[in-house]
Amino acid sequence: MAKHYYSIAIDGPAGAGKSTIAKALAQELGYHYVDTGAIYRTVAYFLDLLDISPKDVDGVTRYIDELTIEIEYDEEGKQHMLMNGMDVTGDIRTQDISQKASLVSAHAVVRDMLLDMQRDLARKHNVIMDGRDIGTVVLPKATVKIFLTATPEIRACRRYDELVAKGTDTTYEKVLAEVKQRDHQDTTRAIAPLKQAKDAVLVDTSELDIPGVIAAIKAIVGEKIPG
Ligand code: DC
C-alpha cells in the first residue's frame, strides 16, 4: 500500500509571515518546506531575462516550454530554485520580480504547468506548503489548512523592515502601495485566486509575534496530526 504523507497548507497574502512560520514549523516537524511563490518567481525571472512582459500571454505561452524548473534542498533544508539548471534562488527575491510573479501567475498556461510539480512533492514527502491556492486548488485534501493574514499596513511594515535590512532603498508608502496592488491582483484573478478555503483555519498575525503565531499553528496542527 502506498505510504500516506501529511500535508499542511498555509495560504495568505504577501507579508503575512507564511514563509517564516512554515520554515520554523517544517524544521520542528521534520517536514519538507515548499515555498510555491518561489516557483512563480522563477517563471517571472526567466521571462524577464527574455524581455517578455508578464502580461503578454502569447509571449508567455511561446516561451514557457523552454523553461525547466527544479527544486533542490541543501543540507540545511533550504530550498533552491533551478532555472534550466542555474541556481536563481537569490535573484528572484526583488520587488520587481514580486510584482512580475503576481502578474505571470494569473495565466492558466503557467498555473497548469506548475500544478503537477507541487502535487508531486506532496505525494512523496510530508510537506508544509505555502502559497495562495494550496488549500483551495493544489492540495484540496491537505491534512491541515491555515489561512494566515494580517492588515496591509502591518504586512507592509514587515516587508519594509526586511528590505531596509537588505540595504534596499525604498519607502514605507511605496511598499504599502505594492502590497495593496499585489493583494488586488492575487485576489481578483480568474484562475485560482487567493482566498480562504472553506475548511481552513484563519490566523490573523497582526497582533502576534513569531513565537505566538508558531504556538497558535502548532495547536491547530496538533488537533489533526498525531505528535
Ligand atoms: O509568496 P510570494 O510573494 O513569493 O509569491 C509571489 C507571487 O506568486 C504572488 O504574488 C502570487 C504568485 N503565487 C501564486 O499565484 N500562487 C501560489 N501558490 C504562490 C504564489
Image: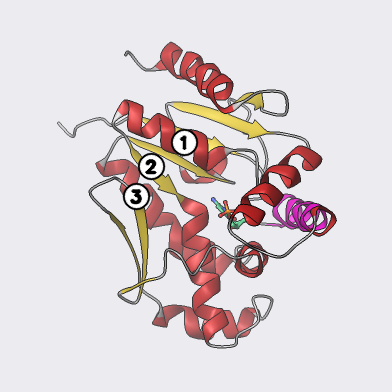
Where does label 2 land, which residue?
33
Establish whether ligand 1 lies closer than 8 Å to the Cβ of label 3: no
Tell me the quadrant of the picture where the C terminus can be found.
top left
Q: Is mark 1 within 8 Å of ligand 1?
A: no
Helix, strand or loop for disc 1 = helix
Q: Amino acid at mark 1?
A: Ala
Q: What secondary structure is the magenta-colored segment mainly? A: helix
Is residue 15 depicted above or below 227 in this figure? below
Which region is colored magenta?
A: 175-190
Residue assigned mark 1:
22
Q: Front-most of 90 and 59?
A: 90
Horizontal side of residue 173 vs 19, given as left or right: right
Give residue 154's quadrant in the image.
Answer: top right
**At 72% across and 23% down in the image, what residue appears?**
207
The label on residue 78 is: 3
Name the image quarter holding residue 209. top right
Dot 3 amino acid type: Lys
Judging from the image, what secondary structure is the residue with disc 2 in?
Answer: strand
Give the amino acid type for the residue marked by disc 2 in the picture: Tyr
Residue 86 in percent (x, y) is at 33, 75
Callout 1 touching callout 2 (CB < 8 Å): yes
| Residue at left offset 64%, top offset 56% | 163
